[in-house]
Amino acid sequence: MTSVDLAAEAAADLAHPPLRGPRRARLFAWLMAGPASLVMLAIMVYPLTNLLLLSLRDYDGASVTAYQWVGLANYEAMLADPRFWAALRRTLAYCLLSVTASLALGTLMAFVVNRRFRGVTVLRTVFILPMVAMPVASALVFEAMMNPNQGILNQMLEAAGLPPYAWLAHPGSALLSLVVLEVWMGAPFVMLIVLAGLQSMPQEPLEAARIDGATPLQALWFVTLPMLRSALATAVLFKLIDTLKQFATIWVLTEGGPLRSTETLYVYGYALAFQFFDVGYGAAILMALLVLVLFVSLLWMRVRERAWV
Amino acid sequence: MTAAPAAPAPLDGPVVRPPPGARLRRLARRLSFALLAGVLLLLFLFPFWWMVTASLKLPRDVSTFPPALLFTPNLDQYRAALSEPAFWWQTLNSLVVALGLLLGLPAAYSVARFRLRIVPLTVLVVRMIPGVVFMLPLFLVYRQLGLLDTHAGLIVAHLIITLPLAIWIMMGFFEDVPVEVEQAALIDGCTRWGVFWRVALPLSLPGMSVTAILAFITSWNDLVFVLILGGNDTRTLPASVLSYMGFDTLNFAGIAASATLLSAPVVLLSVVAQRWLVGGLTVGAVK
């Protein structure tokens, strides 16, 4: 075989998956992916499996060797733990509230910046900022603005003749205050997804509806929104995953308080594992969070297969 | 027959003279749209405006109401924040996204061209999972290896953020490189490594910059990793702000300056690179 033949053969198997191709192509493929795969095994796959094992143990985190195998006892304790159920309910409430509000606000924003007018690019840029700005920084700013004594929000309330209110110090309003911040940070992502949907949408159905005499509201409800269905589903599921994972803002603003009124699953698991060093039980709680996140991810993969493949 | 009609009739029938109220109604509609856009703009800009102005005021002037619009800027708070090593550790941790790219690029190429299914699946799962899930076992391992509160340890941990991101985004860019170009290079006698190094990489340079910026942003914005694996020696700025906030809550100017410093690099990057980033921020969700 000449070298040209070899090259031609190699070129042919670039187009075909190497499973049937020569061994050398496969070797090359794994050599390229090898370092990354090893790192991923060491710092991602191994910790994941280890978390599962930890959740089957009673471990106070103090010594290195004193593990006690307890089987499913941690999970049994979890199911009997009212603090777990309360955290789960809070997590779901937090997610549903913030995702719904982000969806509404983000869609509205997408419709606004989908129009053409002077300054629309500026508006679009400003809208994206909360999404990339560091969550800790945003949380700090919101905390300062919501400060009961000198925060600017309460100063505005007082200027309007209303009494100041400690948003973050009352169990009834702390979670809602966190939702406000979450929406402020989350709506821009919805906007981007819906905007992409709007811009790739065919215009003919809308024109047809207009000719048939649909009012703008009817066209929006019966034509545009149904066509945006998969974009909206994607936005909802992505935001759901994001909010399930929210920790930084909650930790900065309330650390789960007051009176545990903002203690989500994440915060509860973190506190158990790293503040009370109840590692085994903390691992079980984090497993519950993991299952929740993976369930939503599976849903999202189903949606994606239907819509784009 | 006579000449062709001068213009096609509009779709909705013959032109009708607008009814008397129409212009007024249109004006009202435009005004309410401008009002809506203005309210939204205010909503999203206000916290940033507050943050930047508060950081430039003297601490005693921060909470005067109504807030002063004109004042002489004062940079003391920035001097204080920048003299803390925490800010620079933060920068160091995030600049090593380069490491994630170094490992991620060949892997992404391999996945895109040779369809190693197990890698993208792992990447996807890792990207969905909350960081704390990795942190608990990693914390125990690090403690045993003496890696807690070391920069090496944090830099490796940041790979959990940057590596999957790099593989996930670059996969798409490598798939967009036409196979024919690579085949031509192979036939001309280029090695497989040469194809990757001389053909695929240069063709996906824009993708690489998006990936680098996004990896930088996500790694910069991290709190939970440094909270768990870091300590006094490696504290980054968000962790250090959190630690002094407890007894110094009312130094709004200081907090605002830290928040501005923390947001500034990311915000500037995204304003500059906005055109490309929008595609990157939604990657995986659209397309």
Image (cartoon, helix red, strand yellow):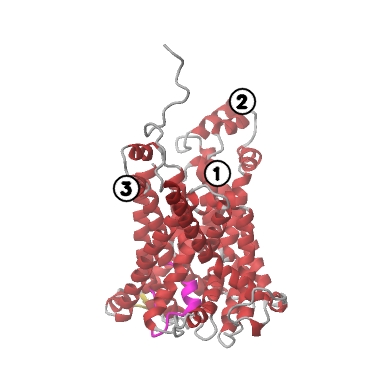
Whole-angstrom CA distance, mark 3 to mark 1, is 40 Å
The magenta region covers A245-264
Q: Label 3 lies in what chain?
A: A
Mark number, residue A218: 3
Residue at (58%, 61%) from the top-left corner? B217
Q: Label 2 lies in what chain?
A: A
Residue A268 shows in the view: no
Front of the two marks 2 and 1: 1
Whole-angstrom CA distance, mark 2 to mark 1, is 29 Å
Whether callout 3 and callout 1 share a subunit is answered: no
For disc 1, the marked residue is B173
Mark number, residue A4: 2
**Mark 3 secondary-structure assignment:** helix
**Mark 2 secondary-structure assignment:** helix
Q: Residues within 10 Å of mark 1 (few under 14, many from 20)?
A: many
The picture places residue B225, in percent across and down from the top left corner, at 54, 70
Residue A161 shows in the view: yes
Q: Is residue A145 magenta?
A: no
The picture places residue B260, in percent across and down from the top left corner, at 63, 70
The chief SS type of the magenta part is: loop
Residue at (46%, 44%) from the top-left corner? A199
The picture places residue A60, in percent across and down from the top left corner, at 43, 82
Whether callout 2 and callout 1 share a subunit is answered: no
The picture places residue B230, in percent across and down from the top left corner, at 58, 75
Front of the two marks 3 and 2: 3
* Cβ atoms under marks 3 and 1 closer than 8 Å: no
Q: Label 1 lies in what chain?
A: B
Q: Amino acid at mark 1?
A: Phe
Whole-angstrom CA distance, mark 3 to mark 2, is 64 Å
Picture layout, residue A140 above or below residue B35: below
